[in-house]
């Protein structure tokens, strides 16, 4: 059996076995007091009796604790780097704090064991200086003062999950290394946990941040070997659309898709393939002649959407993947409000899906676990971290996986919508939760997360290294260019202002003092598309497209 098995059984620690011809077993239990069995060995019979007694005691504890052992073994096998996000300053501290200089996860009665599957030289080799990271707090830095960032990383690797922390292991460490910047926090080592650490932006970074952060990552399983080296990696982009709010967004998005694809093909090998607008209104519209469109039926009457029109999306993609014929083996599910910034390669590893992680999709969040269990079964919080923090877009997936996932997504999206607790907890992103739960139900637990796949201004500001600009948030600034989050700006852009009619041909230039390159690029991108697409002035006034872009004419630089 593995070493220290008894230590993992109900807090029992074996302290001694033999002392100078005597056999003694001391079982120290946290809640059971102390049990002594001592016998002088003076004959073979007594020796056999003692051995049998020891075996009986061990077996008894093992029988009553087999479930506990299974849980521990399972959590160790399933623990993966993950991503969720809680501010460490606001997270609840551990209920029991270790002595200031004790190794986290240890007490005076036991010694932490480093995960022997980890190469500390490797996992601690790439710390991020001047960076503070989010995470659920496992050990507070004020009670865990260590001499170096390397020792902080080692402490994270050695941390033993506890039931109080839902058996969540340490995969994020933050060490205050700069004495000048840290002050009283100097040498403090915070141990934390994130469901997907590499998919979360740092809480703070820059020359004035005295913290150094790092991640403990475990190897991931991918399906790279399932495709040949000369596999055709081209992907088909599909967007879902219905109604006036996304009508003009689809036109702008398609313009930038084709312009980016032109540049991609001119540069050589290009993974960008065909494009489909998936119209889930059930009838053709005025953009059929401009954008390749596949018409899907809306939800049947027995499944009312109660005004939540996004519920049509799973049903539309289910119809499309079953009925459409495309030459590509891979699909990028995208959205109308995506403006392409540069050519994007197929980000999948083999047939492993790839997606952008959303910080607000938290299937492993403790308060959400009872809801998640309704739809995927009785899983632990550790197991719930295998559910990726994604929606269906932007997501790369093979056609084969889509054929498996879409029927499940349709059914779970309806079930989530009809479940009062789930619908209330997840609100307007409920179909995103339904999608990732469906991937889990379909056995897809190896999704690659790409934080830099998509930018979301105004919270992101620089063009690099993003492939897509997603304009889902309002953007508010003073006339001087100062960002005013949560307050209507003197200059602002919000796509919701153009839900009934398209924006005018020339949107006003952002303030000169505004430093956000993505916001400025978005305005220029919409203006460029509206200058090339014919008859935009009438289109802006009526919302009806009467003249159509040829898909070949682009603005020159």
Image: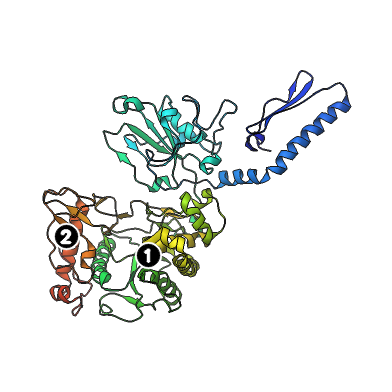
Identify the mark nearer the N-term, 2 or 1.
Answer: 1
| Image x and y of residue 193, in percent | 45, 42
The quadrant in which residue 456 appears is bottom left
| Residue in view at x 31 percent, y 31 percent | 210
| Image x and y of residue 342, in percent | 27, 57
Towards the viewer: 390 or 100: 100
The quadrant in which residue 378 appears is bottom right
Q: Is residue 255 visible?
A: yes
Q: Is residue 65 left or right of residue 203?
A: right
Q: Which residue is mark 2?
A: 524
Towards the viewer: 219 or 503: 503
| Image x and y of residue 324, in percent | 41, 76
The quadrant in which residue 161 appears is top right
Neighbor class of circle 2 (other Cα within 10 Å; few <14, some 14-19, many 20+) is some
Alpha carbons under labels 2 and 1: distance apart: 25 Å
Label 1 element class: strand
Q: How is the image coloured?
A: rainbow
Q: Which mark is residue 333?
A: 1
| Image x and y of residue 546, in percent | 19, 80
Quadrant for the C terminus in the image:
bottom left
């Amino acid at each position: 059996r593995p070493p220290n098995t008894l230590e993992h059984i109900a807090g029992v620690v074996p302290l001694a076995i033999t002392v100078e011809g005597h056999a003694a077993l001391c079982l120290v239990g946290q809640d059971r007091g102390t049990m002594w069995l001592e016998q002088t060995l003076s004959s073979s019979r007594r020796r056999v009796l003692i051995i049998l007694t020891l075996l009986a005691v061990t077996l008894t504890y093992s029988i009553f604790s087999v479930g506990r052992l299974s849980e521990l073994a399972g959590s160790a096998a399933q623990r993966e780097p993950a991503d969720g996000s809680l501010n460490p300053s606001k997270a609840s501290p551990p209920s029991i704090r270790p002595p200031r200089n004790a190794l986290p996860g240890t007490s005076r009665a036991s010694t932490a064991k480093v995960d022997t599957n980890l190469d500390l030289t490797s996992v601690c080799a790439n710390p991020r200086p001047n960076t503070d990271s989010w995470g659920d707090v496992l050990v507070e830095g004020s009670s865990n003062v260590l001499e170096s960032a390397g020792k902080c990383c080692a402490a994270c690797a050695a941390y033993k999950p506890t039931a109080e922390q839902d058996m969540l292991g340490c995969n994020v460490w933050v060490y205050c290394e700069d004495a000048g910047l840290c002050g009283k926090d100097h040498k403090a080592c915070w141990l934390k946990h994130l469901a997907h650490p590499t998919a979360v932006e740092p809480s703070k970074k820059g020359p004035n941040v005295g913290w150094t952060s790092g991640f403990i990552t475990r190897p991931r399983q991918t399906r790279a070997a399932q495709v040949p080296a000369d596999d055709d990696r081209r992907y088909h982009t599909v967007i879902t659309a219905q109604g006036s709010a996304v009508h003009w967004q689809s036109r702008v998005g398609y313009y930038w898709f084709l312009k980016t694809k032109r540049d991609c093909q001119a540069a050589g090998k290009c993974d960008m393939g065909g494009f489909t607008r998936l119209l889930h209104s059930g009838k053709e519209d005025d953009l059929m002649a401009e954008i390749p469109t596949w018409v899907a039926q809306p939800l049947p009457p027995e499944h009312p959407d109660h005004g939540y029109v996004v519920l049509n999306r799973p049903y539309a993609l289910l119809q499309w993947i079953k009925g459409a014929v495309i030459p590509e083996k891979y699909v990028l599910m995208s959205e109308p409000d995506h403006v392409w910034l540069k050519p994007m390669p197929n980000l999948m590893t083999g047939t492993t899906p790839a997606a952008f992680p959303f910080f607000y999709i938290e299937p492993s969040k403790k308060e959400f676990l009872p809801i998640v269990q309704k739809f995927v079964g009785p899983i632990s919080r550790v197991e719930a971290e295998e559910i990726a923090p994604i929606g269906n877009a932007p997501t790369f997936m093979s056609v084969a996986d889509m054929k498996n996932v879409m029927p499940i997504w349709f059914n779970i999206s309806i079930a989530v919508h009809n479940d009062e607790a789930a619908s209330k907890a997840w609100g307007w992103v409920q179909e995103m939760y339904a999608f990732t739960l469906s991937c889990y139900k379909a056995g897809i637990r190896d999704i690659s997360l790409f934080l830099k796949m998509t930018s979301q201004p105004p919270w992101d500001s620089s063009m690099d290294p993003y492939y897509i600009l997603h304009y889902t948030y309002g953007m508010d600034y003073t006339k001087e260019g100062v960002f005013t989050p949560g307050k209507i700006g003197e200059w602002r852009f919000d796509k919701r202002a153009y839900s009934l009619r398209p924006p005018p041909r020339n949107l006003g230039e952002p303030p000169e003092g505004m430093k956000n390159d993505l916001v400025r690029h978005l305005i220029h991108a919409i203006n460029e598309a509206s200058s090339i697409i014919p008859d935009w002035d009438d289109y802006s006034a009526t919302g009806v497209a009467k003249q159509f872009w040829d898909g070949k004419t682009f603005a020159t630089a």
